[in-house]
Amino acid sequence: MTADLLIAGGRVFRGLAGGFTDAVAVKDGRVLALGEDALAAAGAGTKRIDLGGRIAIPAFNEAHMHLLPYGIGLANVNLRAEEVRTLDELLRRIRVAAQAAPKGGWVLGRGYDHGELDVGRHPTAEELDAASPDNPVLIVRTCGHVGVANSMAMKLAGVGHNTPNPEGGVIVRKNGKLTGEFQERAKRLIMDVVPQPDQARMVAAIGAANDYLASLGFASATDMNVGMTAGFAEIAAYEAALAQGKLPLRMWQVLAGNPEGIAQKAWAEGMRPMQGDDSLRWGAVKVFADGSAGGLTAAFFDPYVEAMGGGTGVFTFPDEKIHALLKLYHEQGWQLDIHAIGDAAIEQVLVGMEAADSETHPFMGRRHRIEHCGFVTRDQRRRMKARDIHPVPQSTFMYEFGDLYVKVLGHERSDRAYPMKTWLDEGAHPAASSDCPVCTVDPFINLFTMVTRKTNKGTVLGPEEMLTPEEAVHCYTWCGAFTQFAEERKGTLEVGMLADIAVLSKDVFSIHPDEILKTQADLTFRDGVAIFDRHGEAAGVVAAQ
């Protein structure tokens, strides 16, 4: 049998168990042969890719991100800390956007980090009013759990001084006066009056996000909270994107399961777990248990550092309510993908999961997930493993927010955060991910952090949790596939597996860790077909008929 594609001339990482070989051959979208057998399978009609000393790996799998919001957010005001370090610069960008917008049109900004701003605090409604007096404004912190609105936005939302805090949310006041800050579910009060994007814009956003991820070496991704941007219309937008050929990545979809989400409507409309195929599969439901550590809303047993505000965070729901949601979605057959960062929130979720586990509806084999799972205790890890519950962590949080963690939680707790090595050693399958747009989706920053445990300021947190490059790539490929019930089809480059392959510009397994940050994807294949080609190497590689 003659191969359609041969990739040789450098190392090929088969996976953590298989190690390395020197060639991979592809036929009809799957791995046909490896090593000498791959070379022997090449014929006159085989397209050849010369690695030239580069490395080929299983394509990355982004196991936890918000793909549609990321695509939509590309048009919002960029306030991320890489570019915005002062309050004056943040307000300048809002002012420029407001001047360019029609009077009364919304100005939306994403990604600011109050911990990185020179003032060390959130902007206020009054400051946003001065920058945008004629337009409603909502800016969202990088974590996505906290936002600040100006006075016009609050007026449109009907929020006044006496508006009560909604369940699981906080409308921040100082001396009885609204500051403009909205935490957790309170943020919905503002978001619900922001005009929703139409289908054409959503399809374009999905396509743009897919193309960008393909350029980074991803062939699989996730949208973690479908329905929280434009409601039920997001399902149709994804179906349209697939029909229009704007979905090159394999998508694992997670429905918004909070009461304001769409999971219950989707069930009533006939959607069922695992509906779809590897191109677009609806497999899970997400429920929020708490907020973010950097935003001081992740729920902990022990309080935050007093000088940074103290408190123990915010539970999204009381025990009985979140436990009822977990039981409902578990018994419907959905995978549970539950947001819990602080140890108290993880405990609340675990207790609810343990209560939902029954002879009629057993947990084993369901591969339920705790998303983030950042500050997990030893006992909680043990109980997760006993019930086939898996962590989906973001080492990138350590890179972007690690120094803030030290400020708000102390060094000891920060060292123990996101224990990747411990999870692997204990037999868990931590699916590395970014939570983009909370953090950059750049996989090489994530790999660097898993290998070094360094923050972007150079602080090393918990060096005993460093991974080898092989382990880090394993977490970013096979572990993600495992949490999506797809490890027998993707996540390694063994014979018979789907030919989802990324060719990287540098051999990340042999270079100095600092060089990982300078690495990029040169080629990305899905089913042996190039979905990204930086240098035009894959001309003539066509889809199998």
Image: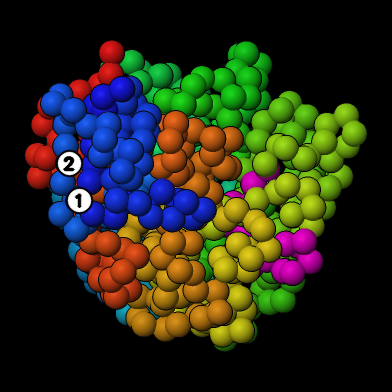
Q: Residue 356 at x, y = what percent?
A: 83, 40
Q: Secondary structure at mark 2?
A: strand
The quadrant in which residue 197 appears is top left
Asked whether disc 2 touches disc 1, contact meaning CB atoms under 8 Å apart, the reply is yes
**The N terminus, quarter of image:** top left
Residue type (three-letter) at the residue carrying disc 1: Gly
Magenta residue check for 373: yes
What range is drawn magenta here?
368-382
Q: From the viewer's perspective, tell me whether residue 468 is left or right of residue 388.
A: left
Residue type (three-letter) at the residue carrying disc 2: Ile
Q: Which residue is mark 2?
A: 49
Please name the residue shown 40% across and 19% down the image. 239
Judge by depth and name the residue closer to the eye, 357 or 534. 534
Q: Earlier in the sequence, mark 2 or mark 1?
A: 1
Q: Residue 218 at x, y = what percent?
A: 34, 44
Please name the residue shown 62% across and 59% down the image. 373
Q: Is residue 109 above or below residue 47?
A: below
Please name the residue shown 53% across and 49% down the image. 479
Judge by depth and name the residue closer to the eye, 66 or 5. 5
Judge by depth and name the residue closer to the eye, 131 or 261. 261
Around disc 1, counting alpha carbons within 10 Å, would you say few (fewer than 14), some (14 to 19), or many (20 or more)? some
Q: From the viewer's perspective, tell me whether residue 123 is left or right of residue 529.
A: right
**The C terminus, quarter of image:** top left
Q: Is residue 428 above or below residue 225?
A: below
Whether residue 409 is visible to the viewer of this picture, yes or no, is no
| Label tally | 2
Magenta residue check for 530: no
Q: Which residue is mark 1?
A: 9
Judge by depth and name the residue closer to the eye, 461 or 177. 461
Q: From the viewer's perspective, tell me whether residue 94 is left or right of residue 253.
A: left
Please name the residue shown 72% across and 76% down the image. 302
